[in-house]
Amino acid sequence: MIILGLHFGHDSSICLLKDGKILAFLEIERIRKIKHTIGIKYEEIELLLNANNLLLKDIDCATITSTQLVEEIIFDSDKLDILFSKHPRDKLFSYLYDEAKVAHEDFIKSGKGWLKSILANDSLPHPYKLMVPKDNDILDKKFLLNFENFISTNIWQEQKKFSEISITKYTSLINKNIQYGFHYPVTLKLKDLTIPAYFFSHHYSHLAFSYYFSNFNNAALLSNDGAGGSYEPWNGGGYFGYGIDNKIYMLTPNSINAGEIYDYASMALGFKDSGGAGKLMGLAAYGKPIFYDEKFVGNWFDNEKKNTNVWIDHCLKMAEKNYNIKNFGKQDLILDKINVDFASSTQKLIEEILKKSANVLDQLLINSEIKTENLCLSGGTFLNCPANSKIYNETKYKNIFIPPALADMGLSIGSSMALLALLGHKQPLVSHENIAYLGLNSSCSEELIIEALNSFNSKISFFKSENIHNLIAEKLSKNSIVAIMNGQSEIGPRALCHRSILANPCFYQNIETVNKIKNREYWRPFAPVVLEGKEKEYFKNCPFPSYYMLFNAEVINDKIPAVTHIDKTARIQSISNKNEYIYKILTEFEKITQIPVLLNTSFNDKNQPIIEYPVDAINYFLKSKIDFLTIENYFISKNEIK
């Protein structure tokens, strides 16, 4: 069975799932070169099919997701469209359609969306305007409203605060209607072909990605993203759920607004580009949580349904006496006390909210007579490494799993895996060492490499080496900066050594050197990669191994200053021998230096997606101050300008 997963929202993506195995996954930003891009075009589906030698007729069914309030843009309805009718071949039970008898015309009325109105308002600044393709006639395209109104229960309308949720018994919701209540049948049109398709709940898909990749039989499930809190479950910021025996049960909306607080706080600090939340996380280490107040720890209802600006106003009110308020949010004064203490206070608040969320989930499961030591996290908020480590270190859960593409780009995978399970197929066990490398499987082919090398022949010198890993390690030991490109690209926003820039971690000045190369702020930290099994020699208070750079560790060794943040922490990536290319580099580097650690950052320029193709890699290499580039077994250097 081949399932086509389509995510139309920001960080749009396409997934091909065959019998439970992901054939390939495409983050569309990588080929459009528009970070966090929105929407899917037919040609992008065709690209992924061709790369896997598949035809349209090979697809059995499809899933559809989007970001909350982001419509599906239909660029060319003759090639790609969504039809509101149940396909004749569709045999899957849907609670809404088959039990609740929600007709398609009624389902359509539940749709919501604000993307088109944002694009139409010339005076409204909004990041979404930078994410859509630069089509002059974009507003003339067909915009389908997004759908997030799925099954609901009286208990969700009555129990909303954390204090109420934690003492509620949800055992009655472990049933078939809940299991099959978060999708709705439609038909997908691909040129002249139609196939069964399903709209899937945003947060159901988040949780499915984490649960089905975790290899856990049973697990507590927790999602949160930037959507914020609301009366309506579809916009509740996230869900608490439970997974067991290949089945997922959504137990209650959690109305956590941690992600929304983080996004708005980042913008208040002047981080208006797409990496704002990550910048705030890095900045927080320079300050102290002076403005933190426990009264804000809870969900949206605990905080009396107040919006995020209340937190920002609280901090600025406290700062009036002892801080220079005029410096708040000024980028040239970002290390001023007002900015770093605001960041630190916000970071502590997020950590405490998410830790409390995990504890509330644990308590509601106990009240529902459910026992598990496993926790699956998903949604963009859990890119926050210090918060994840706090959950690991300070809650009862013994095993925590967070997938690499946990933000919205992972929804095409999550919905595909959810559909496979609902159709009665068991999800096969996955190798956690390799699931981060599911990107376009044709983008680093020998043909494309040779073509790119030849196109820059006058500007570069290159040769093919059977000992490429030794050569890279030697250059790094001599403090050269080396960019590497190999295999299928990593999925998600973190650099995981298939499209990376590497440096020697023993030289403190490499923080400044690599930040200049990437056109980043000078104060931002870099992450280490470390050989699996050697983590405890350099780090502590983090789950080992940690394959996806999603947990913070405390650095306990002073030999790696370039990957040690100002607060003596680092977000690590463990490297196993299954990740052969970087494993061999690290092993050889350790032989030379006795250090099994390297500095690693993503291979991309400021505000650009991670590089996908060899031609883009060479182009960026030539305009940057990277010393050497390797693409698979090719070693590339710059020709001297005469």
Image (tube, helix red, strand yellow):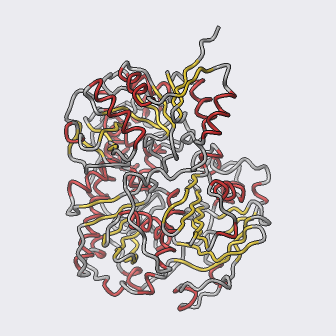
Q: Nearer the viewer, residue 363 or 428?
A: 428
The reply to whether residue 232 is visible in this rendering is no
Note whether 587 is above or below 228 in the view shown.
above
Q: Indicate left or right for 154 with 632 as reference.
A: left
Where residue 270 sits: x, y (%)?
A: 49, 39
Identified at 25% across, 35% down, the residue is: 568
Identified at 27% across, 59% down, the residue is: 355
Identified at 56% across, 38% down, the residue is: 607
Q: Indicate left or right for 187 with 593 as reference.
A: right
Note whether 276 is above or below 428 in the view shown.
above
Residue 167 found in image quarter: bottom left
Of the 4 image quadrants, the one containing the N terminus is: bottom right
Q: Nearer the viewer, residue 42 or 95?
A: 42
Of the 4 image quadrants, the one containing the C terminus is: top right
Q: Residue furthest front?
A: 466
Where residue 42 sits: x, y (%)?
A: 71, 59
Note whether 481 is above or below 17 in the view shown.
above
Where residue 521 sits: x, y (%)?
A: 45, 30
